């Protein structure tokens, strides 16, 4: 089984040639589909519409999976200071921070600080980093104030989005540049020296609308450790309406920043130097749309991610190796964590309606990832992973009240060859506002190059003059892809009085999960004879029950409740406590007057353990927020005060992390 290839057969030139062939094929397919199609009939009296479940615009009551929508109003009411914090509003989601600048999120547990089993999509582009498979939550080149809505698909969705869409998919849609023209200025400060400032301008020239956003942020993190975080963001989003049916979007953005990291070769819980990062992207999207049911979309996406961190570290040899013979001996090691990754991706999507009862979306994508890092592979060679995907999703009305959604994604990559990710959903719709759904979905996660070929080792120079080789992490070679199968039974109801309920019962079967195993028989390790080797180690089974309630009474009241209960775990999963038994989030908001809004949020999660530590995390937090809007001449402004209160011995990832009550103030100004 090939692992990667830098041979002439998989060079960038070959990759782009394949891109061109795929583009010409799909354009010719579009030319043959000139028949006008019927527009999807969705009005304000029906349920909210979603896009991320199947790539088809659908009422939420027709979705093949349970979806949580976090709209712009809820983002504002929550007072969240980061994207990852918003995910606490989703049933079954957990959020943690080993250090301040390295947050992570997971759906239904089973994760560590670099979670490779969650997909984040921003305006159609994937954001996880090929270096370690995780999402750089602190270095995402998108400002919270630019987000229009977030859709979270609470199920595997590899049939739609492919790699990393393993347990859940978070899809972010930013505001169109034409919305709210003028200036937007936001500044906020508060606990642990948190400071942020955002300036955004929406403008237009002739047929082109654009938005320019600049943001700077700093945070000193937990009070008791020096986990500093810094970031500066700049982005430009443009929208050019070429003619009534053709539009072109060009987006460019970058975040330069960094944070203090947890050490790899030092004593447990120790900190290492400040790690500088650069995350930059370019996205081009051309779309020809005759209607919502008849369109062609072509997207090119490029991402560059760079880590800059090199220097010498000194640590206690006896403590690091567990060997008392090293008592009093210190060891110096040169650590070069400098690494970078790039991604080129071309995706083409065709949407059309076959007839009144049948809609279809299909397409394909070509991707090439490159990874380079002396720290990860103990050489300076650039490694490539080439991926080709074809997908199709069908929505078919069997009878007046029965709806069948089916889809499949076929993927071929240079690590694990060909895999298939199917999904099937049968829904009974008693009315356009109610759905009873039985569904099945499969997720596939391809091993990372780090997991397959990683070689993290260090040449050590001890204070007694001896030299050692410490092999810390070894790739597994010929690993199988991870697989998850989920069967769920869901019920969705949207009442005309503003009340919505979403109930789901799901059975999860996970196989061949990749994790490092500690080996004490590594002959080439002359320091402690201990190395971690990636293997397909774990199979897990468990069941979850989720309830999400949303109630909005006109514009005065808003209430959201999200609860998840995990049970039926196999003995191994229950012993390791990787999934919290209960998670709960409550948000209630009320307009005390036309200008004053009060919001209260409660977050709870029972004990669970992140997979790379032994400490038990738990969450018991209350947030209170009071906001007042006012007008000064032509300015619309608001001032908000917020408190984040620990009310039950919260542990965030590590017991070492000191949790304090935090207070913040935010001023927002909008100018026409």
Image (cartoon, rainbow, N blue to C red):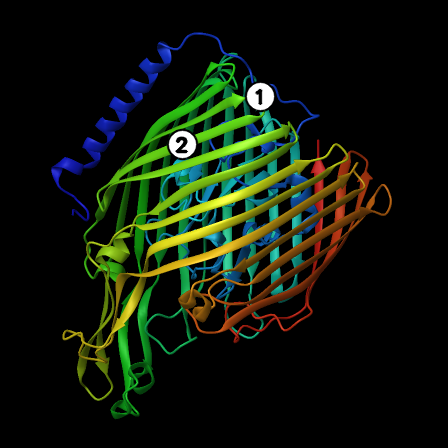
Q: Is residue 399 visible?
A: yes
Q: Could you tell me residue 574's position as x and y percent?
A: 46, 67
Q: Mark 1 sits on what residue?
A: 400
Between residues 503 and 626, which one lies in front from this camera angle? 503
Q: Residue furthest right?
A: 593
Label 1, label 2: how far apart the Cα atoms are: 21 Å
Within 10 Å of the Cα at label 1, are there few (<14), some (14-19), or many (20+) other Cα atoms?
A: few
Residue ID at (34%, 70%): 264
**Crowding at mark 2 (Cα within 10 Å: few <14, some 14-19, many 20+):** many
User: Looking at the image, which is closer to me, 20 or 116?
Assistant: 116
Residue 26 tag number: none
Residue pointed to by mark 2 = 407
In the image: residue 287, left or right of residue 538: right
- Residue 621 point in image, percent of width and height: 66, 64
Q: Is residue 637 above or below residue 469?
A: above
**Residue 534 appears left or right of 38:** left
Q: Which percent across, then down, holds residue 668? A: 70, 45
Quadrant (top left/top right/bottom left/bottom right) for the C terminus: top right
The quarter of the picture where residue 18 lies is top left
- Between 115 and 261, which is closer to the camera in this rendering? 115
Residue at 23% across / 60% down in the picture?
Answer: 475
């Amino acid at each position: 089984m090939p692992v990667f290839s830098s041979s002439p057969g998989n060079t960038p030139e070959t990759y782009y040639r394949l891109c061109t062939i795929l583009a010409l094929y799909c354009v010719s397919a579009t030319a043959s589909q000139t028949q006008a199609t019927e527009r999807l009939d969705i009005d304000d009296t029906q349920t909210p519409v979603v896009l991320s479940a199947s790539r088809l615009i659908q009422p939420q009551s027709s979705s093949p999976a349970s979806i949580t929508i976090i709209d712009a109003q809820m983002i504002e009411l929550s007072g969240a200071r980061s994207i990852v914090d918003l995910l606490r509003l989703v049933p079954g989601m957990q959020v943690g921070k080993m250090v301040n600048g390295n947050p992570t999120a997971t759906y239904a547990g089973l994760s560590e600080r670099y979670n490779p089993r969650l997909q984040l999509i921003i305006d159609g582009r994937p954001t996880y980093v090929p270096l370690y498979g995780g999402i750089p939550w602190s270095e995402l080149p998108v400002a919270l104030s630019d987000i229009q809505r977030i859709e979270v698909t609470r199920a595997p969705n590899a049939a739609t989005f492919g790699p990393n869409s393993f347990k859940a998919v978070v899809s972010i849609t930013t505001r169109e540049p034409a919305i709210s023209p003028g200036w937007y200025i936001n500044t906020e400060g508060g606990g642990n020296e948190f400071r942020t400032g955002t300036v955004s301008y929406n403008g237009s020239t002739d047929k082109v609308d654009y938005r320019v956003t600049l943001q700077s942020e700093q945070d000193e993190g937990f009070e008791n450790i020096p986990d500093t975080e810094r970031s500066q963001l700049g982005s430009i989003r443009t929208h050019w309406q070429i003619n009534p049916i053709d539009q072109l979007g060009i987006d460019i953005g970058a975040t330069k920043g960094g944070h203090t990291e947890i050490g790899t070769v030092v004593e447990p819980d120790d900190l290492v130097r400040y790690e500088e990062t650069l995350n930059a992207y370019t996205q081009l999207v051309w779309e020809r749309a005759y209607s919502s049911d008849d369109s062609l979309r072509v997207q090119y996406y490029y991402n560059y991610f760079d880590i800059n961190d090199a220097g010498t570290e000194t640590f206690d040899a006896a403590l690091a190796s567990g060997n008392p013979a090293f008592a009093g001996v210190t060891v110096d090691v040169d650590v070069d964590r400098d690494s970078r990754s790039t991604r080129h991706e071309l995706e083409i999507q065709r949407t059309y309606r076959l007839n009144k009862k049948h809609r279809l979306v299909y397409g394909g994508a070509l991707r090439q990832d490159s990874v380079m890092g002396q720290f990860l592979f103990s050489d300076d060679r650039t490694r490539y992973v080439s991926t080709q995907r074809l997908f199709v999703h069908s929505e078919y009305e069997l009878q007046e009240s029965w709806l069948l959604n089916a889809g499949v994604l076929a993927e071929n990559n240079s690590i694990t060859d060909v895999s298939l990710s199917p999904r099937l959903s049968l829904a009974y719709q008693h009315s356009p506002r109610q759905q009873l759904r039985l569904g099945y979905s499969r997720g596939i996660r391809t091993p990372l190059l780090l997991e397959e070929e990683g070689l993290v080792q260090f040449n050590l120079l001890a204070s007694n003059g001896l030299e050692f080789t410490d092999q810390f992490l070894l790739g597994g070679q010929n690993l199988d892809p991870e697989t998850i199968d989920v069967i769920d039974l869901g019920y969705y109801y949207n009442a005309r009085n503003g009340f919505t309920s979403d109930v789901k019962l799901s059975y999860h079967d996970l196989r061949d999960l990749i994790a490092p195993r500690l080996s004490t028989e590594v002959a080439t390790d002359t320091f402690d004879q201990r190395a971690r080797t990636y293997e397909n180690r774990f199979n897990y089974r468990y069941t979850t029950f989720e309830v999400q309630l949303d109630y909005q009474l006109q514009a005065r009241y808003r209430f959201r409740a999200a609860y998840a209960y995990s049970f039926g775990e196999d003995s191994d999963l229950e012993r390791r406590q990787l999934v919290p038994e209960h998670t709960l989030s409550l948000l209630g908001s009320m307009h005390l007057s036309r200008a004053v809004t009060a919001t209260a949020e409660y977050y709870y999660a029972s004990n669970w353990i992140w997979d790379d530590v032994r400490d038990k995390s738990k969450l018991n937090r209350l947030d209170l927020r009071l906001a007042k809007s006012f007008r000064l001449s032509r300015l619309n402004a608001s001032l908000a005060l917020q408190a984040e209160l620990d009310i039950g011995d919260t542990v965030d990832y590590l017991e070492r992390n000191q949790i304090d009550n935090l207070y913040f103030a935010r001023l927002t100004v909008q100018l026409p």
